[in-house]
Image (tube, rainbow, N blue to C red):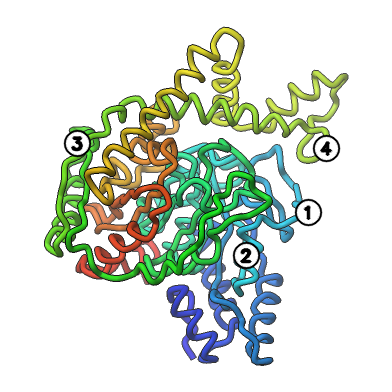
Amino acid sequence: MSNSWYEKTALEIRDAVRAKKVSALEVTDSCLKRIEEVDGKLLAFIDVWADAARKQAQAVDAKIAAGKDPGPLAGVPIGVKDVLCTKEGTTTCCSKILKGYRSPFDATVIERLAEAGAVFPGKLNMDEFAMGSSTENSSIQRTRNPWNLDCVPGGSSGGSAAAVAGHECAVALGSDTGGSIRQPAACCGCVGIKPTYGRVSRYGLVAFASSLDQIGPFTKDVTDCALVMNTIFGRDPKDSTSADIPVPDFTKALTPAVKGLRLGLPKEYYTDALGAEMRDKIQAAIKVLESLGAEIVEVSLPHTDYAIATYYIICTAEASANLARFDGVRYGYRAPGVANVDEMYRKTKSEAYGHEVRRRIMLGTYVLSSGYYDAYYLKAQKVRSLIRRDFMDAFKQCDVIVTPTSPTPAFKIGEKTADPLEMYLSDIYTISVNLAGIPGLSMPCGLTASGLPAGLQIMAKPFDEETLLRVAYTYEQKRGFEMGMPAALRG
C-alpha cells in the first residue's frame, strides 16, 4: 500500500477511500507524517490536530464498514486558515489579541465539510487578521514558499497555499478580501478561487472587511476545486449576505471546450507595470486557449487606477468597525496592571495588535471620522460602483476576463516589509474582483527562469463559476506541463 497518499489529489483520495483501496486513517497518517517531515521548513501549520484528525478518519472508515455513504469528500485532508472558527483547537487569526481563544462553534464551511467526510489536520498560518500579502504579519511565524524557502508564500492565506503546494494536505481553506486566496495560490503554484460575494457562507469567518471577504479553497487542480465548491457553496440562514441561488454540480462544468468563448484582455492590466517574464507566461497561456477556439477580445476597465485607493479606504473603514470588538474585556489578551478602563483599552490594543493591523485601524478610523466621511468613505463607495460597472460593461463583450494574478513571482522574505505601498501593489490585479463582487480564480501557468510559479487569473460574471471552471479546466488539460513537487522540497 502506498504511503505517499499525501501527494494525491482530493478526488483520487476520495475515490480510493470509498472503494476501500485505502482507509481514511491511512491517508490521514500519511498526511500527518508529511507535516512532521516538511513543516519544519515551511512553517505553514500553527497547530496540528493529530488525535482529532485520526478520530475523524476512523469515523469515515466506520461509516464505510457499516455500508453507509461516507460523503463526497470522504477521507480528504483539509487544512484550515486560522481566520475560521473551529471548536477544535484555538482561533486566533494569528494575532496576540486572540491568543488562546477557543471558539464555541464551527464555521458553516467547517460543518459542511465535516458532513462531507473531510478530515482536518490543523490550523494554518496567515497574516494577522488577514491583513497582508506575504504572511509576514503573523504574530506566530513566517511561512516560507515551497518553491524557494527564501521567498514569501504570498498572503494573507500563505499558510494555506504553502500547505497545499507542499503536499501537507490535499485541500486548504482560505479567505480572500483583496486577493488573499488568489495571490498566494499564484506564488505557490496551486489553484485558488475567490467565489462570487454571497456564494459561500461567511458565518464563522472572523470579519476583516465584511463587504469584501469571501471563503474559498486552495487545491492541487481544478477538478478538486469544483469538488470542494459543491460542498461549501449555498445559502446559509446564519449569514444574511449569503445568496439564495441553487448550487449546480460544478464537476459537470469540467469539459475541455472553449470554442467560441470570448476571452477579454483588459488593456489597463497589460502595461509596463507587468514584468516581461510574467507577461510572456500569461500570453503563452492565452495562446493555448486561443488555439482551442477561444476568441480574444480587448476590453477596458477604465477605473482600474483607482482600485487600490478605493480598496484601502473601504477595507480599513470596515476593519476599524469590525476589530473594535477585540477589547480585552470578554476574551483574548488583556494588558496587565492597568488603572482604569481607558488605560486597559489603550494598552491592550497597543500591545496586542501588530504594526499593519494598527496602521489599518487608524486609517479606517480616520476615513470614517466626522468631516472626512464624505470626502473619503462615501467617495470610495461611489468609485466602487464605477469599478463594478466597468466589469459589467466588459462582460457584455466577453465571457471571461483573463489577466495575471500578480505582477511578479513570489518576492524575497523581508523585501517589501519596509514599504507598505510596495506591498499593497502586490494585489494590484486582484483587488478589483472583490470590489466588484465577481468570482476570480488563479491557477499556475508555468515556472519563471528562477523556478518560481507564475499565476494566471480568470474572472467571470457574478455567479458564473461554471464558465470560470470550464476555461480553467480546459487550460489545465492542454497546458503541456505539470507543476510537480516544489523544488525546495525535493529529495
Which residue carries the number 4 mark? 330
If you read the primary sequence from the N terminus, does the residue marked by circle 2 or circle 1 appear first?
A: 1
CA gap, disc 2 to disc 1? 17 Å
SS at mark 1 in the image:
loop
Question: Is residue 40 in view?
Answer: no
Q: Nearer the viewer, mark 4 or mark 3?
A: 3
Q: How far across and down, in percent of the image, does residue 434 sit? A: 44, 40
Q: Nearer the viewer, mark 3 or mark 1?
A: 3
If you read the primary sequence from the N terminus, does the residue marked by circle 1 or circle 4 appear first?
A: 1
SS at mark 3 in the image:
loop
CA gap, disc 2 to disc 4? 29 Å
CA gap, disc 2 to disc 3? 40 Å
Q: Looking at this view, is 150 or 355 the one in front? A: 355
Which residue carries the number 2 mark? 112
Which residue carries the number 3 mark? 267
CA gap, disc 4 to disc 3? 50 Å
Which residue type carries mark 2? Arg
Q: Nearer the viewer, mark 2 or mark 1?
A: 2
CA gap, disc 3 to disc 1? 48 Å
Which residue type carries mark 3? Lys
Q: Looking at this view, is 451 or 426 the one in front? A: 426
Q: How far across and down, in percent of the image, does residue 279 sit? A: 18, 45
